[in-house]
Image: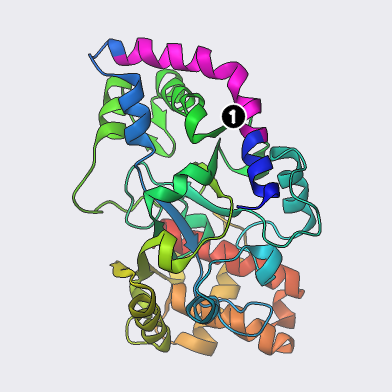
Amino acid sequence: MTGYEQAALNYVRQRAEPRHAECLLRLQQICALWDNDAGELIRQALQKPVTVNFHPDRLSNNGKTVLENLSEQGFYHGQFRTGISNGALGSKRLRWEQEMFGGAYPESFADRPKYGALNIFHFRDGASVRFGSCFFVLKTSVTDRCTFSYGDSSSDPEIICTGDTFAGILTALLRGVELHSRMLNQGVSTQQEALAILLHRPREWKAMGRNLDFCIETHIHGSLSLQNDVERLFLDGSYRGTELEQTARELCRKYGIGLDWIPERQIGLDEVGRLFRGPELPPFAEKIDRLFGGGGVINACLIGKAARDSIAHPERWNDSGTPAQVFQLTKQLWHTVGYFG
């Protein structure tokens, strides 16, 4: 890591430390009720996989797809280098980072934190579906240079921790169970049940989480190398038999990464409602089907084709709005497919 990145970690640690002893004591009290050790709970929670959701077929600022750049460069880069984002782009993200990391990163610095989420439920579609149809699973060695927030950075999260001050995240999770019978986006009846989930290490990734809005956001400081830091790649089933699948297989062979599949998520045109993400989506989905599909369904692959075409041929999308509005519609349509598909 650079000095900037180490300074960001140090800032978050110092910010979390005043509450750490109190949170750790509370965690020890809860664990003792069921004869568990708080230190072991923290260790097991930090062994949960960090997943980085992304759209593999979007165009970067060099005209190549995300997956093509990943294969050629061997590194996963953030939006300040690629020029694309699946969330907030540009000045908003810069402001949030300056606040979260105490201004440790110079504004001109392109190699800023990369974003993922801690997949405590081992969801087969990743910990934060909002940000992409596919995802990388990172090796647990990466967590030593991660910071974590209870909630998305766009929501001005109050709790931000490092791995060695992680008790704050866990007490917040357990507090959510106590007050609302919910842990992130899942109904969890008791704190005892929550402890069992946090300590469980399943052999297989089974459940689809469809988690759009609740996460333990993870910020990876330093470079994110496919060779050294990535364990597996999960692709959506809509990419089977496409050129993107071939690129993914070459990438995985090149960097020693395992390849897995997420069951294809698709939604019928008649299921793209007006309420979930707004009345503009049904006609937008119909246009995508008319141009690229014709089967009456929308999936990740078709949304990707539309996103690329809107950059290559923006005039074809004038009836859907400005380029910024079309970008927003593709995001919102993916949210709909990711949740309902």
Q: Does residue 159 show up?
A: yes
Q: Position of residue 217 (x, y in %)?
A: 53, 44
Q: Residue at x 52, y 12 (%)?
A: 22
- Seen in the picture, residue 17 relative to 92 is either above or below; the reply is above
- Residue with the most extreme left position: 203
Report the front residue among 114 and 327. 114
Q: Position of residue 275 (x, y in %)?
A: 56, 54
Q: Is residue 219 left or right of residue 133?
A: right
Q: Residue at x 59, y 69 (%)?
A: 330
Residue 120 quadrant: top left
Q: Amino acid at mark 1?
A: Ile
Instruction: Give neighbour class at mark 1: few <14, some 14-19, many 20+ (Cα, 10 Å).
Output: some
Q: Position of residue 71 (x, y in %)?
A: 47, 79
Locate the C terminus and report the quarter of the image it occupies: bottom left
Q: Is residue 197 left or right of residue 130?
A: left
Q: Residue at x 43, y 39 (%)?
A: 185
Q: Does residue 273 show up?
A: no
Q: Is residue 221 left or right of residue 122?
A: right
- Seen in the picture, residue 11 relative to 168 is either above or below; the reply is below
Residue 118 is one of the magenta-drawn residues: no
Write down the residue under mark 1.
159
Q: Residue at x 47, y 57 (%)?
A: 52
Q: Position of residue 113 (x, y in %)?
A: 62, 53
Report the front residue among 236 and 326. 236
**Magenta-colored segment: predominant secondary structure:** helix
Residue 18 quadrant: top right
Residues in magenta, as a range: 11-31
